[in-house]
Image: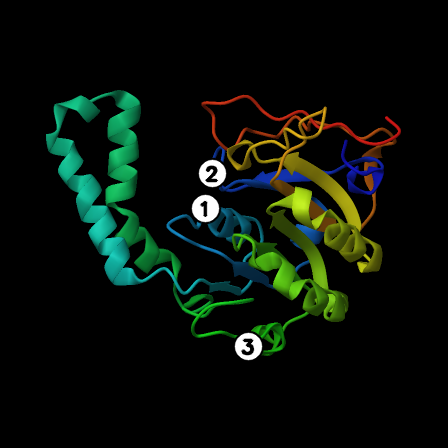
Amino acid sequence: MLPKQLKPIHKYNLIRLGKKNDGGYLVEKESLFNSKGLISFGLNYDWSFEKDFFQNNEVPIHCYDPTVKYSSIKKFSRKYLLKLFNKSYWSITGIKNIIKLSNLSKDYKKFFSKNVVHYQRAIGIGKNLIKLEDVFKNINLSPVFLKIDIEGSEYRILDDIIFFQKNISGLVIEFHNVDLHMSRILDFIRKLNLTLVHIHGQNPGGKDYLDQNQDPIQIEITFSRFNSFLDLQPQIPHELDQPADPRFDEIKLFFDQD
């Protein structure tokens, strides 16, 4: 079972940002609309969350991901463009997806502009490293919303997040290998003066088969500086939740003292 500290106390006013399935996150509305900016760690070839955030709140957005370059995005787009000549991909869904991905480089150029910046810098670990302190100096706004999906490096910046928490309106973070790092996650929650408003298991991360309830090994957690709620009882799973990988069922969540 998951510790009760990971369970939201109430049902909060959430909105889904980002594409369907993997890449979409639930955030609390007040933390979204009261943010003066967005700092996003982990981009890859999907900036649907950042686009939806900007559509709801036109604030400066700073993205950090050293693995993404415009030249690689162009190659990725060309690869999908060639699939239009392969009849095996000729379905309505397949063609729509190919057209979308083949235009990815154009979409990157259009979205990343003066107020939306992509820095090829790493946070936590890696080459071209930047400290969280300098990240906040770059955006020079408060409070800001944080999105963190950095494949395990999140544990390396938890103490820094606590240090700068007064500058944070909301936070969505993916925790990996939670079966190995649960004590660190609980310590982070204990020190963070934000409300835990949502939790979701990531089915691509697998399950902890040593636990009788087979808890997820990877989870998404959303926090908010605002604690207004819609109902006393939490909604788990939430009506806006979607499986990260639609080919597989969602992972059910069980908590201590349920």
In the rendered structure, the answer to whether residue 127 lies left or right of residue 94 reads: right
Counting from the top left corner in percent of width and height, residue 105 is at: 27, 53
Q: Give whichever of 251, 210 is nearer the camera.
A: 210
Q: Secondary structure at mark 3?
A: helix
> What's the residue at 62%, 30% (across, down)?
240
**Who comes first in sequence, dot 2 or dot 1?**
2
- Report the Cα–Cα distance between label 3 and label 2: 28 Å
- Within 10 Å of disc 1 (Cα), the crowding (few <14, some 14-19, many 20+) is some
> Callout 1, which amino acid?
Ser
Q: Secondary structure at mark 1?
A: helix
Disc 2 marks which residue?
19
In the rendered structure, the answer to whether residue 185 lies left or right of residue 45 reads: right
In the rendered structure, the answer to whether residue 133 lies left or right of residue 149 reads: right
Disc 1 marks which residue?
48
Q: Give whichever of 237, 138 is nearer the camera.
A: 237
Counting from the top left corner in percent of width and height, residue 229 is at: 82, 39
Disc 3 marks which residue?
138
> Callout 3, which amino acid?
Asn
Q: Secondary structure at mark 2?
A: loop
